[in-house]
Structures are given as C-alpha cells and as structure tokens.
Image (cartoon, rainbow, N blue to C red):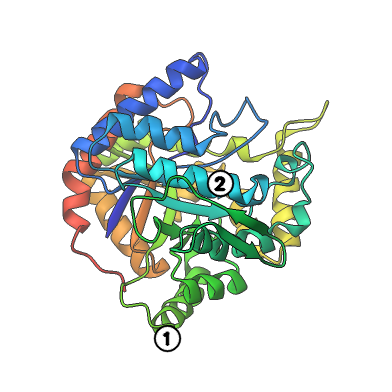
Amino acid sequence: MKFAHFSHVWNKPPLTPHQRYEQLWRELQLCDELDYDYAFCVEHHFRPDESLMSSPSLFCVGAGARTKKLRIGPMGYIVPLYHPLRLVEEIAIVDQMLGGRMELGLVPGITPSYFIPFGVDHAARKSPTQEFVAYMRAAYGEKQPFSFDGEVLKTRSAMISVQPMQKPHPEMWMQSRDPETLDFCAKNGVNTGYFIVFPRHQAAPRYRKFIDDWQKAGWTRKPKIAYSVPIYVDESDDAAVEKALFRASRAYEGFLKEPEPGETFEQRLEIFAQFLNSRGEPGAAQIMRNIFDPDYIYKNDLVFVGSAKTVAEKLHKAASEGLFNTFLGEFNFSDLPEEDMMRSIKLFGEKVIPALRDFEPF
C-alpha cells in the first residue's frame, strides 16, 4: 500500500491564513521524515469559512521547498477553470521545481458555485477535463511548436519553454466513481480513487472492472486506487475516541453551502443529500445524511480513529472491502489541536504504515 497526507487546508480560526500554511508545512515535514509516500491538496474557491487552498501549484512548490522525498500534487486541478496552455506550462514548471516529484491530479469539479464567478459552464466540465489528457501529451511531445485541434481544446503552434522533468509527464490521477470516467482512466493509464461518501461495498465492483479494463488496455504497472477519510491515531482507543471522534464528525461541515438567513444545519445537510440523490447516488446520500453522527461514522468505519493497532486493522479490512491500495489520510480536521494532530501523524507513520506497507488489496 501507499500512504498520503491529504489536506483540504481547512480554515482554522483563530489562525490567520499565513499561520495555517505554516502549520501545514510542519505537518508535511513530519510526513517526509516518516516516509509517507505523497502529499495531496484540494482546489477549492470562494469559501473563506471553509478551505484556504485555491492554488494547488503554490501548495506543491511550498511543500516541495520544505521536503525532500514526498511526492506532491493537487488532487486535483479543476481543469475547466484553466486555459489548457497555461496549465501545461505551469505543470511542467512545478515538476521541474520539485525535481520530478510531482503527482498530477485532474478533476472536472463537482461544485457549481466555483464555476459561476469564472464564467465557465459547469454542465460542460467533463469534456475539457478528459480531453486535457491528450492535450497535455501533445504539449509535452517531441514535436515543438505543438498544435492541438480537439473538440473543446484548441491550440495552434505553441512552443513550450519548459518541459516536465518526468517523461513524458507526471503520473496522473482522476478521482472518480463515475463508470464512464473510470473507463476513460483505464484506457489512458490514469490512477483514480474515491471519497468517504461513496460506500465501499458499492465501490468494489466498479473498481474491479476498472482494474480489469486497465489490464486489458495493456498497462504493465498496477493502477493506484485512492480512498480518503479523516484519521486519528493515539496511544489507546479510548484516548483517540475522546479526543477526535466528535471532531472527525465535524470534519466536513465546509461541504455544506453557506447558510441562508434562518436556514438550519439540518436543512443545509438535506440539500447536499438531495444533490447526491439527483446524481443517482442514494448510497452516498445516505452517508451524507449521517456523516455528522459520531456513532454512525465510527460504527461504519467511515473514519479511522483508534490506537495504531486498531487503525491498522480497520484500514486493512476497509482496503480489502473497498479495493483501494492508496490511503489519503485527512489528519488535520475541525479544531483538533496541533499537538494531538502531530502525534497522530507520527504514530501513523511509525506504526500503521509499517504494518500495512506490504499489504496488496488487489
């Protein structure tokens, strides 16, 4: 298995943005010392009450300057919000600055409110995201200047000044549970993964097909399938539950839209659940309706909270059930104190990772 520090870079009052970023660098420096494999961040916009990360490239460069071994990347760039030519230039420079340590996550973007201020059609987000894979391969090809004439993306005679260090490009990820997107990823050698709200028992058949399609496409390396949830490790189960379970149940309050006057928390939650239902995902809607219930998320292992032994056992079982071989741990959530959060990162790195390093869920 592979292991990542994953961060939404949540806003954590009373920390200023600068203080929050400095805390983030301390987290990643510790992960680097403990031989974590990756550090990933999201791209979120226009919610200062929620995430402080709207520029994944700056995350990558800032993290890279403070670490030596971690592979670092966005999970991922919201591709439709960028001009494709600008994005391929930026990816190449970031990879060079990282000395070839970049991992490249690409996403179409699930949140409509991010698109409106940019003047981009949220409904048309999938095509440019998938077409960007071919665009990028053309941009980093031997023929320079390059041109590209796709259905959505078009460029005529552009010379890329800086090519990525990794050839032909950094390893790609596209987090998705959509069958059509998974088919695209398998054919194009793109790693994938999913998030806490997608039930693991429903995920396994989809990703088993993805693995089969990957092999049929002729890729010789094994694909990576990621899974992301909050995690907290302490010296005992009781200590972990006391310090972190309730906080883990509040990890994703930022997913709910900002409240309208008089609107209750329950109403905001139901709006999000109905959104998932509208996408044909009743299982995800069910999890979302219960994601703020500490007992529910603990009983169903939707968060991993406990001693190193307990967490290793839960993670082993979940990876087998949900067919993932890369774990993206969200260590810094809610108002968890830094001292506790750093101890959790340390215990996970010292005890959980070695226990699961040789485990292969598929």
- Give the distance between the C-alpha atoms of the residues marked 2 and 1, in whole angstroms: 31 Å
> Circle 2 is placed at which residue position?
87
Q: Answer whether residue 337 is visible to the viewer in this image.
A: no
Please tell me whether mark 1 sits on a helix, a strand or a loop.
helix
Q: Which mark is residue 114?
A: none
User: Count of labels shown?
Assistant: 2
In the image, taking residue 260 as reference, residue 30 lies left or right, namely left
Up/down of 102 relative to 227, above or below: above
Name the amino acid type tagged 2: Leu
Crowding near pointer 2: few (<14 within 10 Å), some, many (20+)?
some
The relative height of residue 134 versus residue 297 in the rendered view (above or below) is below
**Residue 78: horizontal and vertical position, in percent?**
60, 48
Query: On the image, numbered disc 1 is attached to which residue?
Result: 216
Snapshot quadrant of residue 113: top right
Can residue 147 be seen here? yes
**For the residues bearing labels 2 and 1, Cβ distance under 8 angstroms:** no
Q: Amino acid at mark 1?
A: Lys
Where residue 231 sits in the image (x, y, percent)? 37, 43
Left or right? Give the position of 173 relative to 349: right
Which residue is more in the foreground, 185 or 92? 92
